[in-house]
Image (spheres, rainbow, N blue to C red):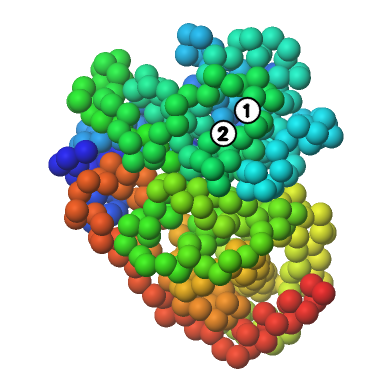
Amino acid sequence: MKNVKHVGVIDIGKTNAKVAVVDIESEQEIGVLTRPNDVLPGPPYPHFDIEGHWNFICLALKQLHEAHGIDALSVTAHGASGVLLDKDGNLAAPVIDYEFTGPDDLAPEYNAIRPSFEETGSPHLGMGLNVGAQLFWQFKSDPELSDRTATFLTYPQYWTYRLTGIQANEVSSLGCHTDLWCPHENHFSSLVECLGLAGKMAPVKRAVDCMGSILPEIAAKTGLPKDTLVSCGIHDSNASLYPHLLKRQAPFSVVSTGTWVIVLSVGGAKVVLDPTRDTLVNVNALGDLVPSARFMGGREFEMVMDGCRKSCTGADVARVLEKNFMLLPAVDPRSGPFQGRQCQWNTDEYSLSDGERFVAISFYLALMTAECLEMTGAMGPVIVEGPFARNMQYLAMLHAATGRAVKTSDGSSTGTSIGAALLCAASNKQTETKQRQHIEAIDTTARHSRYARKWRELLG
Protein backbone atom coordinates (compact mmCIF):
# COMPACT_ATOMS: atom_id res chain seq x y z
CA MET A 1 0.00 0.00 0.00
CA LYS A 2 1.56 3.28 -1.14
CA ASN A 3 1.33 6.72 0.43
CA VAL A 4 -0.23 5.53 3.65
CA LYS A 5 -0.01 8.12 6.42
CA HIS A 6 -2.88 7.31 8.76
CA VAL A 7 -4.12 3.75 9.32
CA GLY A 8 -7.41 2.95 10.97
CA VAL A 9 -6.94 -0.10 13.20
CA ILE A 10 -9.78 -2.26 14.47
CA ASP A 11 -8.42 -3.88 17.63
CA ILE A 12 -10.69 -6.43 19.31
CA GLY A 13 -9.26 -7.37 22.70
CA LYS A 14 -10.80 -9.74 25.21
CA THR A 15 -11.64 -6.93 27.63
CA ASN A 16 -12.19 -3.99 25.27
CA ALA A 17 -12.74 -3.34 21.59
CA LYS A 18 -11.21 -0.22 20.11
CA VAL A 19 -10.71 1.63 16.87
CA ALA A 20 -7.55 3.70 16.63
CA VAL A 21 -5.89 5.92 14.06
CA VAL A 22 -2.14 5.33 13.88
CA ASP A 23 0.20 7.86 12.33
CA ILE A 24 2.72 5.74 10.41
CA GLU A 25 5.54 8.28 10.47
CA SER A 26 5.53 8.81 14.24
CA GLU A 27 4.12 5.35 15.03
CA GLN A 28 1.70 6.84 17.53
CA GLU A 29 -2.02 6.60 18.07
CA ILE A 30 -3.54 9.99 17.28
CA GLY A 31 -7.16 9.04 17.90
CA VAL A 32 -8.82 6.23 19.87
CA LEU A 33 -12.40 5.17 20.62
CA THR A 34 -13.26 2.14 22.77
CA ARG A 35 -16.13 0.02 24.03
CA PRO A 36 -16.25 -2.86 26.54
CA ASN A 37 -16.18 -6.35 25.07
CA ASP A 38 -19.14 -7.48 27.13
CA VAL A 39 -20.17 -11.10 26.64
CA LEU A 40 -23.83 -11.81 25.88
CA PRO A 41 -25.18 -14.59 28.13
CA GLY A 42 -27.13 -16.48 25.50
CA PRO A 43 -29.02 -18.41 24.36
CA PRO A 44 -27.60 -20.60 22.99
CA TYR A 45 -24.36 -20.02 24.98
CA PRO A 46 -22.19 -17.08 26.10
CA HIS A 47 -21.05 -15.28 22.96
CA PHE A 48 -19.48 -12.07 21.72
CA ASP A 49 -21.64 -9.10 20.75
CA ILE A 50 -20.69 -9.17 17.07
CA GLU A 51 -23.32 -6.74 15.83
CA GLY A 52 -22.69 -4.40 18.75
CA HIS A 53 -19.01 -4.38 17.82
CA TRP A 54 -19.83 -3.83 14.15
CA ASN A 55 -22.08 -0.84 14.82
CA PHE A 56 -19.37 0.62 17.08
CA ILE A 57 -16.66 0.01 14.45
CA CYS A 58 -18.59 1.74 11.68
CA LEU A 59 -19.46 4.77 13.82
CA ALA A 60 -15.91 5.00 15.20
CA LEU A 61 -14.39 4.85 11.71
CA LYS A 62 -16.71 7.64 10.60
CA GLN A 63 -15.82 9.87 13.54
CA LEU A 64 -12.09 9.17 13.39
CA HIS A 65 -11.94 9.66 9.63
CA GLU A 66 -13.66 13.04 9.99
CA ALA A 67 -11.19 14.03 12.69
CA HIS A 68 -7.92 12.66 11.28
CA GLY A 69 -8.37 11.18 7.83
CA ILE A 70 -7.83 7.43 7.28
CA ASP A 71 -5.83 6.12 4.30
CA ALA A 72 -5.98 2.36 4.94
CA LEU A 73 -7.43 -0.17 7.39
CA SER A 74 -6.02 -3.06 9.40
CA VAL A 75 -7.45 -5.49 11.93
CA THR A 76 -6.06 -7.25 14.99
CA ALA A 77 -7.97 -9.42 17.44
CA HIS A 78 -7.51 -11.83 20.31
CA GLY A 79 -6.86 -15.49 19.69
CA ALA A 80 -8.87 -18.58 20.64
CA SER A 81 -11.78 -17.52 18.43
CA GLY A 82 -13.10 -18.41 15.02
CA VAL A 83 -16.24 -17.76 13.02
CA LEU A 84 -18.57 -20.13 11.19
CA LEU A 85 -20.39 -18.66 8.19
CA ASP A 86 -23.34 -20.05 6.27
CA LYS A 87 -23.65 -20.16 2.47
CA ASP A 88 -24.89 -16.56 2.42
CA GLY A 89 -21.89 -15.30 4.37
CA ASN A 90 -23.84 -14.71 7.58
CA LEU A 91 -23.05 -16.19 10.99
CA ALA A 92 -23.99 -19.87 11.07
CA ALA A 93 -23.80 -19.68 14.88
CA PRO A 94 -22.91 -17.01 17.46
CA VAL A 95 -19.18 -16.53 18.10
CA ILE A 96 -18.59 -18.45 21.32
CA ASP A 97 -16.83 -16.83 24.28
CA TYR A 98 -13.68 -18.86 24.82
CA GLU A 99 -14.16 -18.66 28.60
CA PHE A 100 -17.40 -20.65 28.34
CA THR A 101 -16.84 -23.97 30.13
CA GLY A 102 -19.23 -26.05 28.01
CA PRO A 103 -16.43 -27.66 25.96
CA ASP A 104 -14.99 -29.11 29.19
CA ASP A 105 -18.04 -31.40 29.39
CA LEU A 106 -16.94 -33.15 26.19
CA ALA A 107 -13.20 -33.08 26.89
CA PRO A 108 -12.74 -36.89 26.94
CA GLU A 109 -14.47 -37.26 23.57
CA TYR A 110 -12.57 -34.33 22.08
CA ASN A 111 -9.22 -35.54 23.38
CA ALA A 112 -9.77 -38.79 21.51
CA ILE A 113 -9.59 -36.96 18.17
CA ARG A 114 -7.43 -33.89 18.85
CA PRO A 115 -3.96 -33.97 17.28
CA SER A 116 -0.83 -34.29 19.40
CA PHE A 117 1.22 -31.37 20.66
CA GLU A 118 4.01 -32.56 18.36
CA GLU A 119 1.72 -32.02 15.35
CA THR A 120 0.15 -28.68 16.26
CA GLY A 121 2.36 -27.05 18.91
CA SER A 122 -0.96 -26.41 20.65
CA PRO A 123 -1.40 -27.53 24.28
CA HIS A 124 -4.61 -28.98 25.63
CA LEU A 125 -6.40 -26.12 27.38
CA GLY A 126 -9.60 -25.82 29.36
CA MET A 127 -12.84 -24.06 28.48
CA GLY A 128 -12.84 -23.05 24.79
CA LEU A 129 -9.22 -21.94 24.64
CA ASN A 130 -8.62 -24.50 21.91
CA VAL A 131 -10.79 -23.43 18.97
CA GLY A 132 -11.06 -27.08 17.97
CA ALA A 133 -12.71 -27.84 21.32
CA GLN A 134 -15.22 -25.04 20.73
CA LEU A 135 -16.10 -26.40 17.31
CA PHE A 136 -16.39 -29.97 18.56
CA TRP A 137 -18.79 -28.86 21.30
CA GLN A 138 -20.81 -26.65 18.95
CA PHE A 139 -21.25 -29.38 16.34
CA LYS A 140 -22.23 -31.92 19.03
CA SER A 141 -24.66 -29.51 20.70
CA ASP A 142 -26.27 -28.42 17.43
CA PRO A 143 -26.35 -31.38 15.01
CA GLU A 144 -27.58 -29.17 12.17
CA LEU A 145 -24.72 -26.67 12.49
CA SER A 146 -22.26 -28.68 10.42
CA ASP A 147 -24.66 -28.67 7.45
CA ARG A 148 -25.30 -24.93 7.89
CA THR A 149 -21.57 -24.17 7.91
CA ALA A 150 -20.04 -23.21 4.58
CA THR A 151 -16.84 -21.47 5.74
CA PHE A 152 -14.56 -21.14 8.76
CA LEU A 153 -12.67 -17.87 9.32
CA THR A 154 -10.15 -16.90 11.97
CA TYR A 155 -11.41 -14.02 14.11
CA PRO A 156 -9.39 -11.03 12.82
CA GLN A 157 -10.14 -12.09 9.26
CA TYR A 158 -13.87 -12.15 9.98
CA TRP A 159 -13.73 -8.39 10.52
CA THR A 160 -11.67 -7.99 7.36
CA TYR A 161 -14.40 -9.95 5.57
CA ARG A 162 -17.07 -7.58 6.92
CA LEU A 163 -15.07 -4.68 5.48
CA THR A 164 -14.16 -6.16 2.09
CA GLY A 165 -16.34 -9.19 1.38
CA ILE A 166 -13.19 -11.31 0.97
CA GLN A 167 -12.89 -14.47 3.08
CA ALA A 168 -9.51 -15.63 4.40
CA ASN A 169 -7.65 -17.33 7.22
CA GLU A 170 -4.21 -16.25 8.45
CA VAL A 171 -1.39 -18.21 10.07
CA SER A 172 -0.75 -16.14 13.21
CA SER A 173 -4.37 -16.72 14.28
CA LEU A 174 -4.45 -20.33 13.11
CA GLY A 175 -1.24 -20.94 15.06
CA CYS A 176 -2.67 -19.58 18.32
CA HIS A 177 -3.50 -22.89 20.11
CA THR A 178 -6.43 -23.61 17.80
CA ASP A 179 -5.49 -27.31 17.23
CA LEU A 180 -6.32 -26.59 13.56
CA TRP A 181 -2.82 -25.81 12.24
CA CYS A 182 0.39 -27.76 11.77
CA PRO A 183 3.05 -25.03 12.14
CA HIS A 184 6.04 -27.24 11.38
CA GLU A 185 4.63 -28.15 7.95
CA ASN A 186 2.56 -25.04 7.25
CA HIS A 187 -0.79 -26.67 6.56
CA PHE A 188 -4.06 -27.50 8.30
CA SER A 189 -3.91 -30.20 10.95
CA SER A 190 -5.65 -33.54 10.81
CA LEU A 191 -8.39 -32.13 13.07
CA VAL A 192 -9.89 -30.15 10.21
CA GLU A 193 -11.02 -33.32 8.46
CA CYS A 194 -12.12 -34.93 11.74
CA LEU A 195 -14.45 -31.99 12.36
CA GLY A 196 -15.91 -32.16 8.87
CA LEU A 197 -14.36 -28.84 7.87
CA ALA A 198 -12.26 -30.07 4.96
CA GLY A 199 -13.12 -27.86 2.00
CA LYS A 200 -14.75 -25.30 4.30
CA MET A 201 -11.60 -23.50 5.47
CA ALA A 202 -11.14 -20.12 3.79
CA PRO A 203 -7.85 -19.68 1.88
CA VAL A 204 -4.80 -18.97 4.02
CA LYS A 205 -3.23 -15.55 3.46
CA ARG A 206 -0.32 -13.61 4.96
CA ALA A 207 -1.00 -10.90 7.53
CA VAL A 208 0.55 -8.28 5.22
CA ASP A 209 -1.51 -9.31 2.19
CA CYS A 210 -3.88 -6.67 0.89
CA MET A 211 -7.45 -7.98 0.78
CA GLY A 212 -8.73 -5.25 -1.52
CA SER A 213 -10.89 -2.16 -1.05
CA ILE A 214 -13.77 -1.66 1.32
CA LEU A 215 -17.24 -2.51 0.11
CA PRO A 216 -19.32 0.36 -1.33
CA GLU A 217 -21.79 0.14 1.55
CA ILE A 218 -18.95 0.50 4.05
CA ALA A 219 -17.70 3.59 2.25
CA ALA A 220 -21.19 5.06 2.38
CA LYS A 221 -21.63 4.27 6.06
CA THR A 222 -18.21 5.50 7.26
CA GLY A 223 -17.37 8.26 4.80
CA LEU A 224 -14.11 6.52 3.91
CA PRO A 225 -12.98 6.70 0.26
CA LYS A 226 -14.18 3.78 -1.84
CA ASP A 227 -10.59 2.82 -2.68
CA THR A 228 -9.55 2.45 0.98
CA LEU A 229 -7.46 -0.73 1.15
CA VAL A 230 -7.56 -3.29 3.95
CA SER A 231 -4.77 -5.61 5.10
CA CYS A 232 -5.51 -9.25 5.91
CA GLY A 233 -5.07 -8.74 9.68
CA ILE A 234 -3.23 -10.44 12.52
CA HIS A 235 -3.49 -12.09 15.94
CA ASP A 236 -3.01 -9.41 18.61
CA SER A 237 0.10 -10.76 20.36
CA ASN A 238 1.78 -11.21 17.01
CA ALA A 239 0.83 -7.64 16.17
CA SER A 240 2.88 -6.59 19.21
CA LEU A 241 5.77 -8.69 17.94
CA TYR A 242 5.67 -7.50 14.32
CA PRO A 243 7.44 -4.10 14.65
CA HIS A 244 10.34 -5.79 16.41
CA LEU A 245 10.68 -8.37 13.66
CA LEU A 246 11.11 -5.49 11.22
CA LYS A 247 13.92 -3.75 13.08
CA ARG A 248 15.58 -5.93 15.70
CA GLN A 249 18.17 -8.66 15.39
CA ALA A 250 17.51 -11.88 17.30
CA PRO A 251 17.68 -12.97 20.02
CA PHE A 252 15.03 -11.00 21.90
CA SER A 253 11.67 -11.54 23.55
CA VAL A 254 8.47 -9.54 23.47
CA VAL A 255 6.08 -9.61 26.41
CA SER A 256 2.62 -8.56 25.27
CA THR A 257 0.50 -7.56 28.27
CA GLY A 258 -3.21 -7.05 28.70
CA THR A 259 -5.86 -9.49 29.83
CA TRP A 260 -3.24 -12.08 28.88
CA VAL A 261 0.51 -11.88 29.32
CA ILE A 262 2.00 -13.51 26.23
CA VAL A 263 5.75 -14.19 26.06
CA LEU A 264 7.17 -14.63 22.55
CA SER A 265 10.85 -15.55 22.33
CA VAL A 266 12.67 -15.03 19.04
CA GLY A 267 16.03 -16.65 18.30
CA GLY A 268 16.53 -18.01 21.82
CA ALA A 269 17.95 -21.27 23.11
CA LYS A 270 16.46 -24.52 21.85
CA VAL A 271 14.07 -25.86 24.46
CA VAL A 272 11.54 -28.66 24.72
CA LEU A 273 8.20 -26.98 25.34
CA ASP A 274 6.01 -28.45 28.06
CA PRO A 275 2.34 -28.33 26.98
CA THR A 276 1.17 -28.93 30.57
CA ARG A 277 2.61 -25.51 31.49
CA ASP A 278 0.76 -23.51 28.82
CA THR A 279 3.66 -23.25 26.41
CA LEU A 280 2.91 -23.34 22.71
CA VAL A 281 4.27 -22.72 19.24
CA ASN A 282 3.02 -19.43 17.84
CA VAL A 283 3.46 -18.48 14.19
CA ASN A 284 4.53 -14.89 13.54
CA ALA A 285 3.50 -12.57 10.73
CA LEU A 286 6.41 -13.77 8.59
CA GLY A 287 5.35 -17.41 9.01
CA ASP A 288 8.20 -18.33 11.39
CA LEU A 289 7.73 -20.45 14.51
CA VAL A 290 7.96 -18.66 17.88
CA PRO A 291 8.20 -20.55 21.21
CA SER A 292 5.66 -18.91 23.50
CA ALA A 293 4.10 -19.09 26.94
CA ARG A 294 1.31 -17.25 28.64
CA PHE A 295 -0.85 -16.65 31.67
CA MET A 296 -3.84 -14.45 32.42
CA GLY A 297 -1.79 -11.70 34.04
CA GLY A 298 -4.08 -8.72 33.47
CA ARG A 299 -7.04 -10.67 34.81
CA GLU A 300 -5.00 -11.76 37.84
CA PHE A 301 -3.96 -8.17 38.56
CA GLU A 302 -7.57 -7.02 38.62
CA MET A 303 -8.64 -9.98 40.78
CA VAL A 304 -6.00 -9.25 43.41
CA MET A 305 -6.37 -5.46 43.46
CA ASP A 306 -10.19 -5.70 43.52
CA GLY A 307 -10.79 -1.96 43.69
CA CYS A 308 -7.71 -1.11 45.77
CA ARG A 309 -5.51 1.88 44.92
CA LYS A 310 -3.21 0.97 42.03
CA SER A 311 -0.09 2.84 43.09
CA CYS A 312 2.61 2.70 45.75
CA THR A 313 5.24 4.70 47.58
CA GLY A 314 8.92 4.03 48.07
CA ALA A 315 8.10 3.00 51.63
CA ASP A 316 5.65 0.39 50.31
CA VAL A 317 8.33 -1.09 48.08
CA ALA A 318 10.90 -1.13 50.86
CA ARG A 319 8.53 -2.87 53.27
CA VAL A 320 7.54 -5.60 50.75
CA LEU A 321 11.21 -6.28 50.00
CA GLU A 322 12.22 -6.21 53.66
CA LYS A 323 9.39 -8.44 54.91
CA ASN A 324 9.27 -10.65 51.78
CA PHE A 325 5.51 -10.27 51.39
CA MET A 326 4.78 -12.70 48.55
CA LEU A 327 1.91 -14.02 46.49
CA LEU A 328 2.42 -17.52 45.08
CA PRO A 329 0.64 -18.90 41.98
CA ALA A 330 -1.81 -19.28 40.59
CA VAL A 331 -4.39 -16.53 41.02
CA ASP A 332 -6.21 -17.86 37.93
CA PRO A 333 -5.31 -21.56 37.87
CA ARG A 334 -7.07 -22.27 34.57
CA SER A 335 -4.02 -21.32 32.49
CA GLY A 336 -0.34 -20.49 32.77
CA PRO A 337 2.74 -22.35 33.99
CA PHE A 338 1.14 -23.40 37.30
CA GLN A 339 -2.27 -24.65 36.20
CA GLY A 340 -4.36 -26.24 38.90
CA ARG A 341 -2.27 -24.76 41.72
CA GLN A 342 -4.13 -22.67 44.27
CA CYS A 343 -2.66 -19.24 45.03
CA GLN A 344 -1.55 -18.38 48.53
CA TRP A 345 0.03 -15.50 50.41
CA ASN A 346 2.94 -16.05 52.76
CA THR A 347 1.45 -13.38 55.02
CA ASP A 348 -1.98 -12.14 56.07
CA GLU A 349 -3.06 -10.41 52.89
CA TYR A 350 -5.67 -8.36 54.74
CA SER A 351 -2.93 -6.71 56.79
CA LEU A 352 -1.38 -5.27 53.63
CA SER A 353 -1.92 -1.68 52.67
CA ASP A 354 -3.15 -0.91 49.16
CA GLY A 355 0.37 0.14 48.19
CA GLU A 356 1.95 -3.03 49.56
CA ARG A 357 -0.66 -5.14 47.76
CA PHE A 358 0.13 -3.30 44.52
CA VAL A 359 3.86 -3.97 44.91
CA ALA A 360 3.36 -7.64 45.78
CA ILE A 361 1.06 -8.37 42.82
CA SER A 362 3.40 -6.47 40.50
CA PHE A 363 6.33 -8.60 41.71
CA TYR A 364 4.22 -11.76 41.32
CA LEU A 365 3.37 -10.90 37.73
CA ALA A 366 7.02 -10.18 36.91
CA LEU A 367 8.16 -13.47 38.40
CA MET A 368 5.48 -15.36 36.49
CA THR A 369 6.70 -13.61 33.33
CA ALA A 370 10.29 -14.59 34.12
CA GLU A 371 9.14 -18.20 34.46
CA CYS A 372 7.54 -18.00 31.01
CA LEU A 373 10.71 -16.48 29.54
CA GLU A 374 12.82 -19.32 30.93
CA MET A 375 10.44 -21.98 29.61
CA THR A 376 10.66 -20.56 26.09
CA GLY A 377 14.46 -20.32 25.97
CA ALA A 378 14.49 -16.52 25.98
CA MET A 379 17.78 -14.77 25.30
CA GLY A 380 18.70 -11.11 24.78
CA PRO A 381 16.65 -8.07 25.79
CA VAL A 382 13.04 -8.27 26.94
CA ILE A 383 10.62 -5.74 25.42
CA VAL A 384 7.41 -5.16 27.36
CA GLU A 385 4.33 -3.97 25.48
CA GLY A 386 0.97 -2.84 26.82
CA PRO A 387 -0.23 -1.75 30.28
CA PHE A 388 2.52 -3.46 32.30
CA ALA A 389 5.10 -1.33 30.47
CA ARG A 390 3.95 1.54 32.72
CA ASN A 391 4.34 -0.44 35.95
CA MET A 392 7.83 0.30 37.26
CA GLN A 393 7.59 -2.30 40.03
CA TYR A 394 6.83 -4.99 37.46
CA LEU A 395 9.74 -3.85 35.26
CA ALA A 396 12.16 -3.70 38.17
CA MET A 397 11.41 -7.22 39.37
CA LEU A 398 11.46 -8.58 35.81
CA HIS A 399 14.92 -7.10 35.34
CA ALA A 400 16.12 -8.57 38.65
CA ALA A 401 14.60 -12.00 38.01
CA THR A 402 15.99 -12.38 34.47
CA GLY A 403 19.26 -10.45 34.71
CA ARG A 404 18.60 -9.05 31.24
CA ALA A 405 17.81 -5.63 29.83
CA VAL A 406 14.12 -4.77 30.06
CA LYS A 407 12.80 -2.23 27.58
CA THR A 408 9.48 -0.66 26.75
CA SER A 409 8.20 0.81 23.50
CA ASP A 410 7.14 4.35 22.80
CA GLY A 411 3.93 5.02 20.95
CA SER A 412 0.80 3.11 21.85
CA SER A 413 -0.72 2.11 25.14
CA THR A 414 -0.80 -1.32 23.55
CA GLY A 415 1.65 -2.40 20.88
CA THR A 416 -1.06 -4.25 18.99
CA SER A 417 -2.41 -1.20 17.15
CA ILE A 418 1.05 -0.09 16.00
CA GLY A 419 1.94 -3.56 14.73
CA ALA A 420 -1.37 -3.94 12.92
CA ALA A 421 -0.96 -0.51 11.32
CA LEU A 422 2.51 -1.41 10.03
CA LEU A 423 0.96 -4.25 8.02
CA CYS A 424 -0.44 -1.52 5.78
CA ALA A 425 3.00 0.03 5.34
CA ALA A 426 5.02 -3.11 4.67
CA SER A 427 6.25 -1.62 1.41
CA ASN A 428 7.15 1.76 2.94
CA LYS A 429 10.89 1.86 3.64
CA GLN A 430 10.35 4.58 6.23
CA THR A 431 8.63 2.10 8.55
CA GLU A 432 11.33 -0.56 8.62
CA THR A 433 13.47 1.11 11.29
CA LYS A 434 11.09 3.71 12.66
CA GLN A 435 9.89 1.90 15.78
CA ARG A 436 11.45 3.69 18.75
CA GLN A 437 12.24 2.14 22.08
CA HIS A 438 13.63 3.43 25.30
CA ILE A 439 15.12 1.83 28.35
CA GLU A 440 13.35 2.75 31.55
CA ALA A 441 15.51 3.88 34.47
CA ILE A 442 14.81 0.68 36.37
CA ASP A 443 15.71 0.90 40.03
CA THR A 444 16.68 -2.56 41.30
CA THR A 445 18.63 -3.58 44.33
CA ALA A 446 20.20 -6.75 45.69
CA ARG A 447 16.99 -7.14 47.68
CA HIS A 448 15.03 -7.53 44.42
CA SER A 449 17.27 -10.44 43.42
CA ARG A 450 16.99 -12.03 46.87
CA TYR A 451 13.20 -11.65 46.71
CA ALA A 452 13.12 -13.45 43.33
CA ARG A 453 15.26 -16.30 44.67
CA LYS A 454 13.06 -16.64 47.76
CA TRP A 455 9.90 -16.72 45.65
CA ARG A 456 11.31 -19.58 43.58
CA GLU A 457 12.36 -21.44 46.73
CA LEU A 458 8.84 -21.19 48.16
CA LEU A 459 7.47 -22.68 44.93
CA GLY A 460 9.48 -25.80 45.69
- Locate the C terminus by quadrant: bottom right
Amino acid, disc 2: Phe
Which quarter of the figure has residue 55?
Answer: top left
Residue 248 drawn above or below residue 21: below
18 left or right of 265 in image = left
**Would you say residue 11 is visible in this rendering?**
no
Residue corresponding to mark 2: 188
| Residue at screen point 24% across, 54% down | 431
Picture coordinates of residue 318, whole percent (x, y): 62, 85
Q: Can you identify the residue that label 1 sits on?
A: 192
Residue at image location 63% in from the left, 85% down from the top: 449
Residue 53 position in % (x across, y down): 47, 28
In-front residue for pair 315/61: 61
What type is the residue that disc 1 sits on?
Val
Looking at the picture, tell me which residue is in the foreground, 324 or 458: 458
Number of residues whose C-alpha sits closer than 10 Å to that of mark 1, classed few (under 14), some (14–19) or many (20 or more)? some
The structure residue drawn at horizontal position 32% and vertical position 44%, both measured from the top left corner, is 423
SS state under label 2 = strand
- Whole-percent x and y of residue 241? 43, 55
- Residue 442 visible in the picture: yes
